[in-house]
Image (cartoon, rainbow, N blue to C red):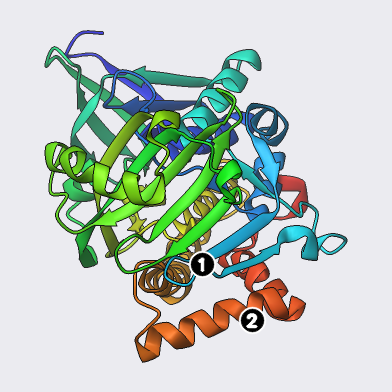
Amino acid sequence: MTSSTESRTPVVVVGGGPVGILNALGLARQGIPVTVLERNDGVARAPRAVVYHWATLEGLDRLGVLSDASAAGFLKQDYCFLNWQTGERVRYGLSLLEGQVTHAHNLHLAQDRLVDVALEIIRRDALPVDVRWGRTVIGVQQDDSGVSVTAARQDGTPERHRASWVIGADGAGSAVRSLSGLSFEGLTWPERFVATDVHYPFEEEGFDQTTFVVDETFGAIIVKINNDHGTGLWRYTYCDPLAENRDVALERMGRFFDTVLPREADREMVSFSPYNMHQRWATTFRLGRVLLAGDAAHATNPTGGLGLTGGLFDTYLLIDSLAAVLRRRQDDWVLDRYAHERRRVFQELVSPTASANKRLIFGSTQTPEGAAAWTRVQRLGQDPEAARARLMFTRQLETPAVVTAGARL
């Protein structure tokens, strides 16, 4: 394609992460061609989301992804809170939801592997999705009939795309959001998270497959990713207020590893990534023919795994709504509803809950607030109804579609 050539497609998705690729897959399943523009030259492999809450699995099943994703990862039910200072463990699990919900388990699978699975399904099913790697979006201009997107290839050559609609799914630093003049309201936490992928015999040390270590210094989120390498690959994420860059994070990492993962001969770090934590949301999730989803629309600290959960629920609603508009089954008011409701859910439910989770996991249980929070955690192990209510929370994050059943996937 020369710089003067303009490709045309009904939908351009900017961002090749799980939200972008699943939006493309879902629209393509309804016969809508999609072009995906991703700035990286392949699937991003940095440690990020790994847990898919039970309530999101019905949507993955509708997209035809759940079976392959489950085969690539594994299903689990258990949760554990570990008070690092006292050694007390509080356990409960999704077995409490058996017989009440379709999927009484979570799926564990690194988000880059979910992207791999979705891309293979797109290829296998010959879906009309054109994924273009190494494209950095540098221009977004819209008019009454569509949107023009300019992307730069890795050699700097410009490439133009014309679409009826654009979905910005390009992360918290979204170029689509910025180029559309939308602000990102909220706050950035002063601390940084450090996400590491590490082989370590956590289960031999008494850790459950999802363990929240509660401590103001050594608080951590420990999640099993897969069963590779005998002991399995695990995500160990901790909070370090001084990890301002990768070099500093690596230099200080031993302090955390030696305390929480003391068997040095048995641990092998595969990758790590320090990153800022946000509680932010875009001014609006719809501006004319530009729609935002996932981290481009809203960003949260990952405590509790609500970031990608919200992005998946964005995806399910947006696929149904945009497909209905493109097929002329609905007026574009359904996209206004998408934008309003997904923003409301983030502001009223996701962000406050994730913030409370962070303050608990990475705070002291010796303060009045921390002690009260730990008492609520203890109740989860003692009162099945309290645990069941907590587990059902993720269902509240879903926005039901208004499209008629015959028009859905």
Left or right relative to 39: residue 89: right
Which quadrant would the N terminus be assigned to in this image? top left
Left or right relative to 120: residue 342: left
Residue shown at 47% from the left, 82% from the top: 373
- Report, in whole angstroms, how far the alpha carbon at label 2 lies from the one at label 1: 17 Å
* Front residue of this view, candidates 124 and 111: 111
Task: Identify residue for label 1.
Answer: 87
Position in image of residue 210 (x %, y %): 57, 52
Determine the secondary structure under disc 2. Answer: helix
Position in image of residue 349 (x %, y %): 48, 73
Determine the secondary structure under disc 1. Answer: loop
Left or right relative to 150: residue 331: right
- Which residue is most to the bottom? 368
Contact flag, marks 2 and 1 (Cβ < 8 Å): no
Quarter occupied by residue 319: top right
Mark 2 Cα-neighbour bin, 10 Å: few <14, some 14–19, many ≥20 = some
Which quadrant would the C terminus be assigned to in this image? top right
Q: Amino acid at mark 1?
A: Gly
Task: Identify residue for label 2.
Answer: 379
Residue shown at 35% from the left, 67% from the top: 362
Q: Amino acid at mark 2?
A: Arg
